[in-house]
Amino acid sequence: MIERTEDVKEPPLLFEETQQVLKKISDLTSREIIVYWSSGRGSVCDNDVIALYEILEKIGPSRKAGIFIKSGGGDVEAALRIVNMLRERFDDLVAYIPLECASAATMICLGANEIHMGPLAHLTAIDSSLRHDLSPIDETDNRRVSVSQDELSRLIQLWNSSSKDHHGNPYSDIFKYVHPLVIGAIDRASSLSIKICQEILSYHIQDSDECLRISTYLNSEYPSHTYPITSREAKKIGLNIKSLDQEINRLLLEMSEYYSEMAQKAITDFDEYNYHDNEILNIIEGKDIQVFFQNDKDWNYIKEERRWQSLNNESSWRKVEFADGKKTKSTLHIR
């Protein structure tokens, strides 16, 4: 049992501040503005779809919208569901990208008619990496590591290019380190990424061959999953890229600063083997409403097994909104 000797740290909630900036952006663009923002430890996931639905229901009907996206990526199937929900509601959708928009988040912005990128903005490749139950274990922290399709492909290429030094099938040696089921799962995930990317692009690109070309390029033509695709590179690929208005870019960066303050690490150490985590990971916001996922759990280190276990987990989605002129806070129950 963890003995708490002090109150746990709570991150600040800056709803009024972000709402003021959001209104300024909406006035400048003449669009409803939706925010999808995640911290370095947050990611695109299925629960985000339900949280976003809560935002859209509060906003109500509108033909034009803009979405500010800042995320390191996550679940590609959740990205498709998010795009589908946005495109069913909005005929004209613009993605505003002032900062990182990686992996599955890149997929989300591909669903917009236009992508407006600022000087600090970048997209990334969409090639799949996977942390499987049978993935290799990192000896430093005793956790499963992620393996990517690109890593495996390059390993095979290196093997074939130096075949005079090797004999037999390369997979016989690879299987010593990477389980064959992991390799099969990664190959399936790569095909899934291309398929989903095609589907997302088809919401506003009618040429199916062009959708396939862009999808395949983003999945296989980059040496790194995190390769930064700048606006210049994105235009070469064939994406509808515009320069982000300077004032809008400034306001988006200001809003991101507020979110970064909300998502600061909120760690309370009890001793060297126990701590409490209250960090906010994902934030989704629209006019008069903000929904966010907040960790709320204890962590205990098991020395014999060299791993951390979570205890007393009360993490949840939480909602702040203006209703009838009053600000209310509540828990958004998502399972």
Image (cartoon, helix red, strand yellow):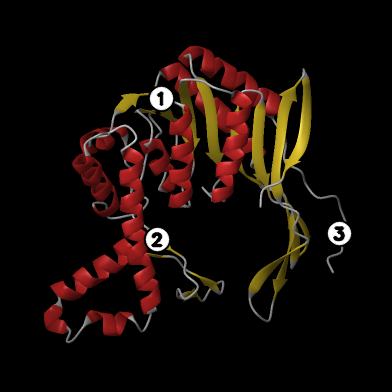
Along the line of sight, the residue nearer the viewer: 24 or 9? 24
Q: What is the quadrant of the N terminus in the image?
A: bottom right
**Residue 52 seen in the figure:** yes
User: Identity of the amino acid at label 3?
Assistant: Arg
Q: CA distance from mark 2 to mark 1?
A: 32 Å
Image mark for residue 287 = none
Label ID, residue 91: 1
* Residue 193 pos. (x, y %): 35, 53
Picture residue at 23% right of the left edge, 72% below the top = 156
Label 1 environment density (alpha carbons within 10 Å; few <14, some 14–19, many ≥20) = some
Residue at image mark 3: 4
Horizontal side, residue 172 vs residue 122: left or right: left
Residue 46 image point, x, y percent: 54, 50
Tell me how far mark 3 sits from mark 2, CA to CA: 38 Å
Q: Tell me which residue sits at (23%, 80%) in the image.
A: 170
Where disc 1 sits, the SS reads loop
Residue that sits furthest to the left in the current view: 164
Q: Dot 2 surroundings within 10 Å: few (below 14), some, or many (20 or more)?
A: many
Q: How many circles with numbers are drawn on the protein?
A: 3
Q: Residue 129 got which mark?
A: 2
Residue type at the position of mark 1: Asp
Q: Position of residue 253 (x, y in %)?
A: 51, 28
Q: Secondary structure at mark 3?
A: loop
Residue at 23%, 52% in the rendered image: 221
Name above or below for residue 288 compared with residue 170: above
* Precedes in sequence: disc 2 or disc 1: 1
**Percent of width and height locating residue 211:** 25, 42
